[in-house]
Image: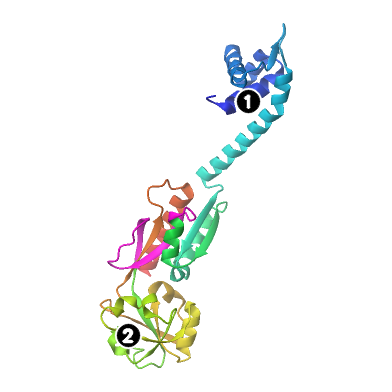
Amino acid sequence: MSDPHGLYEVFLRVAREGSFTAAARVLGYTQSAVSRQIQALEDEWGTVLFDRLPRGVRLTEAGRVLLPHAQGMRDRLRAARAELDAVRSLGGGMLRLGAFAAADVTLVPRAMAEFRERHPDVTVVHTEGPTAKHVALLEAGELDLAVVSTPAGHPLPGPELHPLLTEPMYVALPRGHRFAGRRSLRLAELAGEEWIEGDVRPERTLMFPALRSGFEPRVAFRVNDWTAKQGFVAAGLGITVLPALAAGAARADVALVPVSPRDLPHREVYAATPRGLTRSPAVTAFLGVLTAVAEGLGRD
């Protein structure tokens, strides 16, 4: 059955009009074309659906049994077509988006707000977490797009990557710290400091690239949230590494000083999509918005 939607539309119209000729006139077909399509449907089901009368046609018992199913199929196909049209035109559908925490400070919220203004009928479902989690979710088909990061020069295998920006690293210091006014810092200058990081094991933090050169930070407090980390810094309990994307929410009582890229290389930030799969219109549109927002941040 090459076109079930068309065949059932013809079947329902003939049943309503009681005539091949009248149905053909309403549908804009020839009478012979309507007759051939009804014959094709009867061949498909292996039974006669209409009795041919001297004037018009009448549903057989088999035709009356098929009628409500044909109506249901016609309605479901119409609904499916409407939903597909909405997805194509961004008048509906869903975008499943993931992002690492620092990207959720400024980059991702701005992009989501811009996307919502342009396409208010597309539902965006957001997930936060580390890059490794989002790469796995992309590969499992549970995300459509993710904002991910990796230190410069470190490949990120798996997804298709779309460059967004390069992110330098800062050290957050109390305003009264002796280095608060510096234009840049080497980590060796901070060897005696206590650190506030998201894990007591430095190899699981943003500081892991510096460990290869022998730097051994002393992590005094484990704090995950960027705002909370700054609260600890402002209180004089230690210092922390702050990526540039999180610097947009820096507290007034915290000083940010760039860390030399020789110690902590800049991070590459990407939009990641599943490799080799067709992108939905929503993914393509959001990718464009995200790229524009990232370019704007780079100019700020």
Type of amino acid under label 1: Glu
Residue lying at 43% horizontally and 86% vertically, measured from the top left: 254
Q: Which residues are magenta?
A: 139-165
Between residue 197 and residue 247, name the one nearer to us: 197
Task: Kindly report the distance in space between the C-alpha atoms of the residues bearing marks 2 and 1.
Answer: 74 Å
Given residues 27 and 41, the one toward you in this image is 41
Quadrant location of the N terminus? top right
At which x and y percent is residue 244? 38, 74
Q: In the rendered image, which residue does mark 1 sit on? A: 9
The residue that label 2 is drawn on is 216
Residue 16 in view (yes/no): no
Magenta span includes 65: no
Q: Which mark is residue 20?
A: none
Q: Dot 1 surroundings within 10 Å: few (below 14), some, or many (20 or more)?
A: some
Image vertical order of residue 242 relative to residue 87, above or below: below
Q: Height in image: 167 above or below 118? A: below
**Residue at far front of view:** 46
Q: Is residue 53 left or right of residue 178?
A: right
Choose mark 2 or mark 1, whichever is in front. 2
Instruction: Give the percent coordinates (x, y) of residue 247.
Output: 42, 76
As helix, strand or loop, the secondary structure at mark 2 comes to: loop
Quarter of image, res 205: bottom left
Image quarter in which the C terminus is found: bottom left
Colour scheme in the image? rainbow
Quadrant of the rendered image containing residue 45: top right
